[in-house]
Amino acid sequence: MKNSKIIGGLKGRSLLRDIDLTKDQFMALLDLAEILRTEKKSDTEKKRLKGKNIAIIFEKSSTRTRSSFEVGGHDQGAHVTYMGPGDTHMGRQETIKDTARVLGRMFDGIEFRGFAHHDVELLAEFSGVPVWNGLTDEWHPTQLLADILTIRDHSSKPLERIALTYVGDARNNTANSLLCVGALLGMDIRIAAPLSLQPNEDVQLIAKRLAQHSDAKLSITENPHDAVAETDFIYTDVWVSMGEPTDSWAERIKLLLPYQVNEQLVHASKNPDVRFLHCLPALHNTDTEIGKELNKKYGVSALEVTEEVFESATSIVFDQAENRLHTIKAVMVATLAGA
Ligand code: CP
Ligand code: NVA
């Protein structure tokens, strides 16, 4: 593999924020993910993680991230132990520092999905083994690896010439990671969100600093129609993230309905090849409990994206979801095996 030196350099490392990686390291992980994807699809997968024990800890729900660590670990010959919300003593009856020191003596690598970002930092500091952030309130690093791989799969342009527009709640983990990764990789990143939901100053500062080195073009606006003009990709995420109070819905719906990804907004891109991305889960109809509840309470039949866009040929969200597996597997292989 042409990037084997870079991948070798990641052995023993944690992945807490995607921006702790260099651009070369980020791209090498995507190259490794492509190799692993090809191996899996051609039934020629080599087991690089034989004998490794992996813990995956979730303090919030998950479908894609959990499945990717479990299936990815098993595909590579590792043993994976799942610990769901409330399954461990961590943070309640035992300090994170103590739990980290125990788990580090038993496991070769630990995935953690939680609330405060500092928790995953503590786990990494005191476990002494690679720790992978499976989402915190602030960052969602493994998501962005899958997103950029999907963008690469669906565009013939170099990343530096790709425009990606994120609309909606731009203060959440996905938006923070997206703005900063786009800045790291030198992309044209546009954020459209109401003032109160635009990325906070710390995140903007990180992104601006990265952009100075990469020549990325960054813009933040309140106008979603301007932001999508000639864009290559439109990305959105839920309007209320896990862990936020459910009574945020009334205010978020009022603020964010103008930022809904609907046919009108897709059309405003004036790009017939524009593609729609979403990290999922998505509230695009009333077939879910929350969708039904919000429909009853606020009369909305879809939230951040309409059913028409979600189910259209523009939408590549299931390719994106599948790429979670290949990229998370690449992270485990690079940090535990180094190749
Ligand atoms: N995108 C994502 O992280 O999905 P899950 O919450 O299902 O893991
Ligand atoms: N922003 C969302 C992402 C879910 C994958 C949340 O934190 O709930």
Image: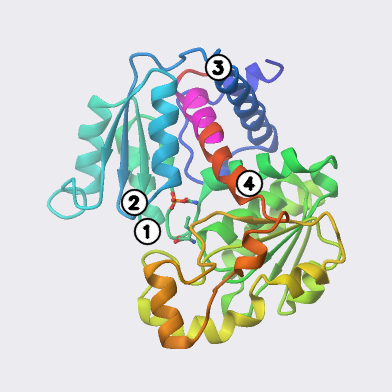
Kind of residue indicated by mark 1: Ala
**Residue tagged 1:** 116
In this figure, which residue is indicated by the disc labeled 3?
339
Q: Nearer the viewer, residue 213 or 69?
A: 69
Residue 181 lies, in percent from the top left, at 65, 49
Q: Which residue is mark 4?
A: 147
**Of circles 2 and 4, which is in front?**
4
Distance CA(mark 2)–CA(mark 3): 28 Å
Mark before the other along the chain sequence, 2 or 3: 2
> Could you tell whether 245 is left or right of 256 in the image?
left
Q: Write the start and end of the magenta stretch as one range.
A: 327-336
Q: Give the labeled residue for mark 2.
A: 119
Q: Quadrant of the N terminus?
A: top right
Residue 273: x %, y % from top left? 83, 54
Question: Spatial distance from mark 1 to mark 4, Cα to Cα?
Answer: 23 Å
Q: CA distance from mark 3 to mark 1?
A: 31 Å
Mark 1–mark 2 contact, CB under 8 Å?
yes
| Marks 3 and 1, the one that precedes in the sequence | 1
Magenta residues, dominant SS class: helix
The residue type indicated by label 4 comes to: Asp
**Secondary structure category for the residue under label 3:** loop
Q: Which of disc 3 and disc 4 is earlier in sequence?
A: 4
Q: Which mark is residue 61?
A: none
* The image quarter in which residue 319 lies: top right
Distance in Å between CA atoms under marks 1 and 2 = 6 Å
